[in-house]
Image (spheres, coloured by chain):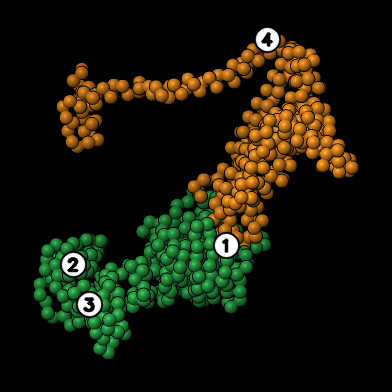
Amino acid sequence: MIEFDRVSLTLGSFRLNDVSLRIGKGDYYFIVGPSGAGKTVLLEAIAGLHRPESGRVLLRGEEITALPPEMRKVALVYQDYSLFPNMRVIENVSYGLRVQGMRKKEARAEVAPLLERFGIAHLADRYPGTLSGGEQQRVALARAVAVKPDILLLDEPLSALDPITQEKFIADLKRLHREDGLTVVQVSHSRREAHLLATRMAVIIDGALVDEGEAGVVLNAPRSREVASFVGIENILDGTVTANEDGLATVDVGGLVFEAVTDAAAGEEVTLCIRADDVVLAVGNDRRTSARNRMSGTVVSVAENGPVAEVRVDAGVMLTAVLTRRSVQELGLVPGTPLTLSVKATAIHVIHSFS
Amino acid sequence: MHNQYNTITKMKTETLSTEPLPAGEEANVTRWNEYRGRYLDWCIVGFCIMGAAIVGITVLAIANITMTELADPAHLLKVAASSEVIGSILLTFGAGASAVLLLILFGTPLAYVLARARPSRLKGAVESIVDIPLILPHTVAGLLVYLLFMRRGWLGAPLSEIGLAFEDALPGTIVAMLFVASPFYVNSMREGFEKVPVHLENVARTLGAGTFTAFWTVTLPLSLRHMYSGAILAWGRAIGEFAGVIMIAYYPFIVSTLIYYSFTTDGIHTSRSIAFTVILVSFGVFYLLRRMTRYLGRYDDRV
């Protein structure tokens, strides 16, 4: 649908560097990255608000690098909603249709179902300044959808909402994507949102695209150490492959030996990524597990976080495991408890360290 | 009696903090309560006294002229009602308004470009040029306008060919006013445009609005307050101009020229009455204009 071909652009002291990506029709595409990585600039570049210095932007195979934003059929919703404060809700939502030449009456009739759908019909005659954050967000979304864009661009749409409103809004977004078949590009720094919504995603750090692909792959099998720590893989360990037999490698991590599935050859430096929920804990010296990797350790700390608890274990290296709060109680885990950890060889994602 | 007071204080304290007060501090709390409401901040008092000197001069000056003028209302009325004075006031206000209209027409686009341009040497240079009339002595400004617009001037010569004369004519007055008032309007308008988030324009663009449509439907309406206050400032500056105007257009008499003329020919008596009339009219007009601001562009600033 839209394609960036080696796009670079400089904006003040910020630089977007040689970014290539392809957003397909019907994708729910996430652009994630730390603050200041250039996510919003990338989004604005898709909208045509910044002209790249080099590279090409293609829409349905046609070059649109120099096409102004009003010709692109790409609607943008900012994090701060950016509602027009001088217009009522109804005027905001029908703005796009009005500037495209539709008469006031027709435009209003056209957007009426949209107001109903987003639950803002009762706010039609209010000014944005009098609305709550969640209401403003829905108005902003309705305004963007009203022009029937090919692509909907969302800049951290959930970050300013309270958790309950967030849940509702995520449901709205899912519906827009699934039922209306809208292509959505969303900027976010939340892994949770990516888990819930994304079909594909790109990771951007310091103006450069460092990983791109299907959401599940990027989240669970990242391409680099940098991406792994950004997408929140709890256990990232550096080691050296000592042997590899038919794809089952033995990796030495500071004296501790892990077995993992990889094609990395002996002598190669690798990084192991282990999700905290793949680390299984058993009290004492438990031998019942079939997992390839088994080691003993002691609990260092237990941090409860809602229904789950994060347990840090010292097993020669520090490992983090996630358990339900209930199983932490049943196992009686407190700092100092000796236990056995096990990790399946297939649960370890191996990143080759290119040097 | 004293005991009872102490107990009350203690109870109040206990609602704020669960820790009992050390015995010695109990007395302090009581004293603090006693001083409440009578406490004087000597720093602010000092500032007020110094500030009063500035306000005082204006108040004294106006009180002075008011007292003397009200002592002879017949003379004041005679002067105020003379066609010469009324005509001159109307001329001044009208010329000022024309200058402001021209500023709105040409200064608004300039202000928008300055507000949206990225910092650069050119932008800095243009901003300095806009500010030049602010730093020049008014006679110099007047001379500049005169030299450019006189019958043999760079612009005056070709314009007089098509019948537009500036020397001792209303267009001369307007041009001089425009020159000295322009920074006030342009700077105020630019500030207004700078306050409108670029995001709003960006959203308008992605919704299908061209640059001008976005400006006309979003940016300009959100800057109306600044446009209005800039226009009032510029107008006030324009109608108060004297030195700048007389260089190119001694005639027709604007009020400043009229007051100066009558001061040097008829003496203080008449010029004082004209001045007082101008004060009254100006106050009235500016009060009305300021009041109208309340109904203009009152959008919620949170967005």
Q: Amino acid under label 1? A: Leu
Whole-number angstrom distance, CA of label 2 to CA of label 3: 18 Å
- Chain coloured green: which letter? A
Can you identify the residue that label 2 sits on?
A313
Marks 2 and 3 close (CB-CB < 8 Å)? no
Whole-number angstrom distance, CA of label 1 to CA of label 2: 49 Å
Element marked by disc 1: loop
Rendered hue of chain B is orange
**Quarter in which the C terminus of chain A is drawn:** bottom left
Can you identify the residue that label 3 sits on?
A252
Instruction: Name the chain letter of the residue that bears numbered label 1.
Output: A
Q: Which residue lies most toward the left here?
A: A284
Give the mark nearest the N terminus, 3 or 1: 1
For residue B238, above or below residue A274:
above
Mark 2 nearby-residue class (10 Å; few <14, some 14–19, many ≥20) = many
Instruction: Name the chain letter of the residue that bears numbered label 3.
Output: A
Have a look at marks 1 and 2 and say if they share a chain: yes
Relative placement, left or right, of B34 versus A134 is left
Q: In the depicted view, which residue is nearer to us: A239 or B181?
A: A239
Marks 3 and 1 close (CB-CB < 8 Å)? no
Residue drawn at (73%, 13%) of the image = B268
For residue B293, above or below residue A225:
above
What numbered label is drawn on residue B71? Answer: 4
Residue drawn at (37%, 22%) of the image = B40
Instruction: Name the chain letter of the residue that bears numbered label 4.
Output: B
Q: In the depicted view, which residue is nearer to us: A170 or A296?
A: A296
Q: Amino acid under label 4? A: Ala
